[in-house]
Image (cartoon, helix red, strand yellow):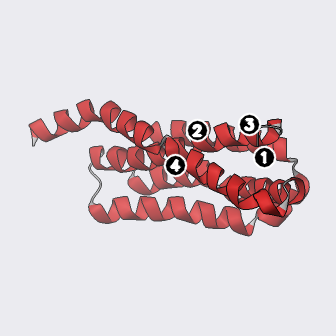
Amino acid sequence: MRASSYLRYMLVWFALVNGAFAGLGLILVVLCHGRGASSGEIGTAQALGSAGTVLGALACEPLTAGLTGARLLTTSSWLLVAGAAAMAVPGPAPLTGLAYAGALFLTPAVNVVFQHHLVRAVPDTLTGRISSTMMTAARSLNWFILMGAGAGAWPTGAARCSRS
């Protein structure tokens, strides 16, 4: 892993992006709740986000055939930012869920490109170690980012609860 600049980059990218997705999932719930959405509407918004990932998985073949790995990473990162910005626009929970779906759409294609490179570049004897390291990195920042997202949402939630 130390010998490959690509794998080192992906290690950091996976940790940051997976943490961002975890925080964005929490923010989705907080935003929808703060806008008065019911539990059912919040669940619908979460389901729409998941549908974005499923649609992205179904579109993997044309996406990976038409875009380089670097282009997918860049586009996926910008979709994450654009999706988060779109989620911040006040609106009904389903629209917030659609923005979340947009943020998640390219994630499966990025995973396909990474796994493809991993299979081609890493000897079979090291694949398990590399995959385990990547998964650990992917989960390593989740707690920190979730706490940050929760702390950022706290003033809004506290103000809403005190008005109730």
Kindly report the distance in space between the C-alpha atoms of the residues bearing marks 2 and 3. 11 Å
Q: Residues within 10 Å of mark 2 (few under 14, many from 20)?
A: some
Name the residue that disc number 2 marks: 16
Give the amino acid at mark 4.
Answer: Arg
Q: Residues within 10 Å of mark 4 (few under 14, many from 20)?
A: some
Name the residue that disc number 3 marks: 9
- Tell which circle, 1 or 2, labels the residue nearer the N-terminal end: 2
Q: Foreground mark, 2 or 4?
A: 4
**Quarter of the figure that contains the C terminus:** top left
Q: Nearer the viewer, residue 162 or 71?
A: 71
Residue 12 seen in this snapshot: yes
- Tell which circle, 2 or 3, labels the residue nearer the N-terminal end: 3
- Rendered residue at 51%/62% (across/down): 48
| Relative horizontal placement of residue 33, taking residue 92 as reference (left or right) | left
Give the amino acid at mark 3.
Answer: Tyr
- Rendered residue at 89%/58% (across/down): 120
Q: Which disc is residue 72 wearing?
A: 1
Q: Which disc is residue 139 wearing?
A: 4
Give the amino acid at mark 2.
Answer: Leu
Q: Nearer the viewer, residue 64 or 102?
A: 64
Q: Quadrant of residue 118?
A: bottom right
Q: Are marks 2 and 3 in contact (CB under 8 Å)?
A: no
| Relative horizontal placement of residue 65, taking residue 130 as reference (left or right) | right
| Relative horizontal placement of residue 50, taking residue 118 as reference (left or right) | left
Considering every residue shown, the one lying at the far front of the view is: 125
Q: Foreground mark, 1 or 2?
A: 2
Kindly report the distance in space between the C-alpha atoms of the residues bearing marks 2 and 4. 9 Å
Q: Is residue 37 above or below residue 77?
A: below
**How far from the left and from the top, in percent, is residue 128?**
70, 61
**How far from the left and from the top, in percent, is residue 132?**
63, 56
Kindly report the distance in space between the C-alpha atoms of the residues bearing marks 3 and 1. 14 Å
